[in-house]
Each structure stands twice: as structure tokens, then as C-alpha cells.
Amino acid sequence: MRVLVTPDYRTLSRTAAELVIKAVRAKPDLTLGLPTGSTPLGMYEEIVREYRDEHLDFSNMRTFNLDEYVGLLHDAPKSYHSYMRRHFFQHVNVSPGNINIPEGKPGVDFDAEAERYEKAIREAGGIDLLIVGIGTNGHIAFNEPGAPFDSRTRVVDLAPETILNAQRHFGNEHVPRKAITMGMGTIREARRIVLLASGAHKANAVERALRGPVSESVPASALQLHPRVIVILDETVKKN
Ligand code: F6R
């Protein structure tokens, strides 16, 4: 596991964006796994800037998002479909048919959807590069503490801590209690994984993930078992 400690959030974002851009340049039909949340916002900005300035071509790239809330329509402002459109897809030329986000809208048969998602990842040849964040409770995607390391895409209950953290973004709106998420098994099959973490509130989770025992009680600790992981932190998250 390589750990890069950058001086600030801007550099963290720039470093993550450069990894993505380099990967797309080397393999224009890259399959890229993508997170949402606060942490990758700067990375998306940097990729979009580079796309504009350097005339990058994302039209052959495929993307798979990590997760989506259950119960929100695509157009709901807090859905991850909306987030991805707002922060990334509306600014770049990823072909709409190459964008994959798990379906969380009401009325979906979620077992069938989970199977469909796994099949789509397999048929794409697996994920080449997967960017992930980490929850304050050590979750990766919405694999909350206790999630089996061999779990696949499925609907899960959000942990109380996750709901509490999300409430800041949802304001007065109700935070969904469930999400559909790639499993830890799905994530561990990605060829390369990049973990991003910024902020003192993540220090404890990062410490447990990188240096603690490998345990399903800290889902991110599974990354210690993966042969190609890069962790990008900024000074605010670094302990000691
Ligand atoms: C988002 C996701 C989550 C977040 C994590 C950190 O798609 O899968 O695991 O990466 O909750 O969120 P932020 O970046 O908002 O601190």
C-alpha cells in the first residue's frame, strides 16, 4: 500500500485527478469506479478543468459508481445520480450509455438490480481503477462495519453514524435509511484502488483502516489485503 500525504486538500484533489487522467490517457477505454461525497469534489473539479484545457476524450471510458440511496428519484437533488451529473457528467463527454450508477429509485426490484449491476461490471471486464472515500466509521461505499469482505452489490441499512453525517447535507430533508452499494467483494476485485481522505474527523478511521487489524468491523481495513492500493491523504488527516 502506498500512502501519499499531500499538504492540503487542493493538492490531494490534484493528485487524485492526475492518477485518473494518466490512467485514461494510457487506456482510453478504461473502466473507472467512482465515489460521491464531499471528499472527491475537488478531484472532479480538477478532472473537468483538465478535460477542458487539454481536450481529453472520455467517450470510450466506462464508469461504475459505488452506490446510491434507496428511495430517491434520479432528479432528487441529494441522489447520487444528481450529484454525478452536477459535478462530473454534465461537464465531460463520457457517453451516457457508458455511465453506470446503481438504481435506487422506488419500485425497483433490488435483487434483480444488484445482479444486473454485478453482471455489467463483469461484462465490462472488471474495474481497472476504483476511487473510494472512507466513512468516519471505516465504511467503504456503503459497506458499514460488519459487512462481509466477500459481499456483492446489494441493499444495505445505513449505520446510525452514516445517517447522522448525511443529515448535515440533507438539512431538513429525511435521510434515506437504505442504500444500494457495491459489496466489499466487488470492490476488492478492482485492479487498482485509490482511497482519498481529508480532514481531522477522518484520522481515526484512516488509522484503523491502514494500521489496525484486518477486520470486517472496519471495512476499509480490507484494503490492506489488496496488492495495488494508493492512499492519498492531506495533512489534516495525518495523525502523528
Ligand atoms: C460515497 C461513498 C461513501 C463516502 C464516505 C465519505 O459514494 O461511497 O463511502 O465515500 O461516506 O464521504 P465524504 O467524502 O462525504 O466524507
Image (tube, rainbow, N blue to C red):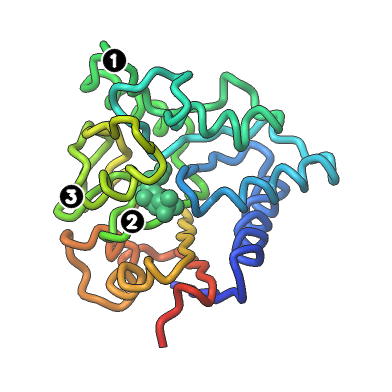
**Could you tell whether 86 is left or right of 178 in the image?**
right
Q: CA distance from mark 3 to mark 2?
A: 14 Å
| Residue found at the far top of this picture | 107
Callout 3 environment at 10 Å: few (<14), some (14 to 19), or many (20+)? Answer: many
Q: Secondary structure at mark 3?
A: loop
**Could you tell whether 21 is left or right of 123 in the image?**
right
Q: Which residue is mark 1?
A: 106
Q: CA distance from mark 1 to mark 3?
A: 24 Å
Image location (x, y in percent) of residue 50:
77, 48
The image's mark for residue 135 is: 2
**Could you tell whether 12 is left or right of 111 in the image?**
right
Q: Secondary structure at mark 2?
A: loop
Q: Is residue 189 visible?
A: no
Image location (x, y in percent) of residue 43:
61, 52
Asked if the residue at label 2 sits under 8 Å from ligand 1, the reply is: yes
Callout 2 environment at 10 Å: few (<14), some (14 to 19), or many (20+)? Answer: many
